[in-house]
């Protein structure tokens, strides 16, 4: 699935859910296993962030996700869309709190 980054700073577009130290920890908790590789299909770096992404259809999308990404792939400078496996996406609400 092609996705692109959503950028609102290190804590994401809304407050981190209670009980989680980071968005990567949120992903791990909801996915049910840890991760050792960035989930951008073209990258094999160690993930450092739970990156906020949306499907390529952009503003029309009602679906936002968290996916493990490395610093480079989750950088505000990375404006390219990229491919992730759908099974690695953990859904979050797209409504700002």
Image (cartoon, helix red, strand yellow):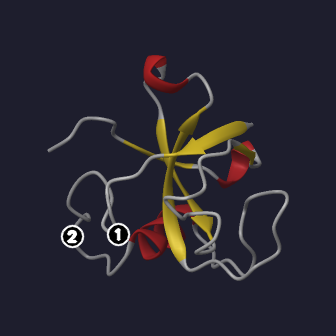
Kindly identify which numbered label has been placed on residue 10.
1
Whole-percent x and y of residue 58?
51, 26
Q: Locate the C terminus by quadrant.
A: top left
Q: Locate the N terminus by quadrant.
A: top right
Instruction: Count residues near mark 2 (Cα–Cα under 10 Å), then give few for <14, some for 14-19, many for 20+.
Output: few
Q: Quadrant of residue 22?
A: bottom left
Instruction: Count residues near mark 1 (Cα–Cα under 10 Å), then give few for <14, some for 14-19, many for 20+.
Output: some
Left or right position of 66 against 3: left
Residue at left offset 62%, top offset 67%: 69
Q: Quadrant of residue 12?
A: bottom left
Q: Earlier in the sequence, mark 1 or mark 2?
A: 1
Secondary structure of the residue carrying tag 2 is: loop
Residue at left offset 28%, top offset 51%: 13
Whole-percent x and y of residue 14?
23, 53
Residue projecting furthest to the top: 60
Tell which of 79 and 24 is nearer to you.
79
Tell which of 81 and 22 is nearer to you.
81
Residue at left offset 25%, top offset 35%: 95
Residue at left offset 20%, top offset 41%: 96
Kindly identify which numbered label has been placed on residue 44.
none
Whole-percent x and y of residue 35?
68, 77
Kindly identify which numbered label has been placed on residue 18.
2
The CA span between labels 1 and 2 is: 16 Å
Left or right position of 57 against 96: right
Image label count: 2
């Amino acid at each position: 699935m092609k996705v692109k980054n959503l950028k609102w700073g290190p804590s994401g577009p809304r407050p981190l859910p209670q009980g989680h130290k980071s968005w990567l920890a949120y992903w791990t908790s909801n996915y049910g296993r840890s991760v050792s590789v960035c989930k951008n299909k073209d990258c094999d770096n160690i993930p450092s962030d739970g990156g906020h992404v949306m499907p390529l259809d952009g503003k029309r999308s009602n679906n936002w996700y968290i996916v493990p990404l490395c610093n480079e792939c989750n950088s505000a400078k990375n404006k390219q869309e990229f491919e992730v496996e759908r099974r690695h996406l953990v859904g979050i609400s797209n409504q700002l709190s």
